[in-house]
Image (tube, rainbow, N blue to C red):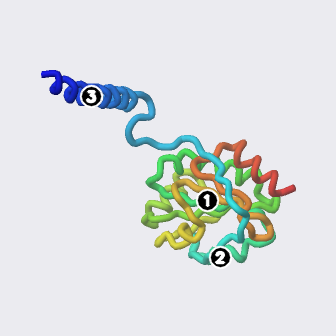
Amino acid sequence: MTSRIVVAAPIALLVLGMLALFGFALQRAQGPGAGFGINQIGMPVALKERPAPAFAVTGFDGQPLRMDDLRGQVVVLNFWASWCPPCRQEAPILERVWRAYKGRGVVFVGLGIWDRDEDAQAFLKDFGITYRNGADRTGEVAIAYGVTGLPETFFITREGWIARKWVGPLSDQQLSGVIDELLR
């Protein structure tokens, strides 16, 4: 009888511990932010400054859109998709800041990835986007830049170097802060 207690006691403690852990996890899973959700907070990502990969796509206006043509200006390169809720949150902010910096040596470029052209163009129209946008239909450009999620924004110096990378939606202040730094 004693040997059964010696064997059963650790097993019972293990089971109780697992149940307590499961109960704690279940309780946390029912709180805010549980389950599948959207990262509403963007964050800068540390990276070693490197040349911005060259790309050439067709803009939604039908004209070529090439990274090499943008040298000499600060470039804000934003990867987005019409089906991405944080991209929808960020779209009016990007347009507002673009209008504030337009003509000051800054160019905004958007690349819609893994999207149907009609959905991407409807997105641009819905948000009144006026800066250049094109389609990265295969994701090739996104892969070259190391995009890990959407939206993702790259800040490129006048010399064509990636100075900053931002994962997630940006606020007006965050966007303006990085642009101001690169314009100095």
Q: Residue furthest left?
A: 1
- Say above or below: 112 vs 150: below
Residue 91: tell me if it is visible: yes
Upstream in the sequence, badge 1 or badge 2? 2
The residue closer to the viewer here, 118 or 53, is 53
Return the residue at label 2. 54
- The residue under the point 75% across, 70% down is 160
Judging from the image, what secondary structure is the residue with disc 3 in? helix
Mark 3 and mark 2: span between their CA atoms?
62 Å
Mark 1 and mark 3: span between their CA atoms?
55 Å
Label 2 Cα crowd, 10 Å radius (few <14 / some 14-19 / many 20+): few
Three-letter code, disc 2 = Ala
Return the residue at label 1. 78
Return the residue at label 3. 10
Three-letter code, disc 1 = Asn
Q: Give the image location of residue 42, x and y in percent.
A: 60, 45
Residue 60: tell me if it is visible: no
Mark 1 and mark 2: span between their CA atoms?
15 Å
- The residue under the point 53% across, 58% down is 80
Label 3 Cα crowd, 10 Å radius (few <14 / some 14-19 / many 20+): few
Upstream in the sequence, badge 1 or badge 3? 3
Upstream in the sequence, badge 3 or badge 2? 3
Q: Quadrant of the N terminus?
A: top left
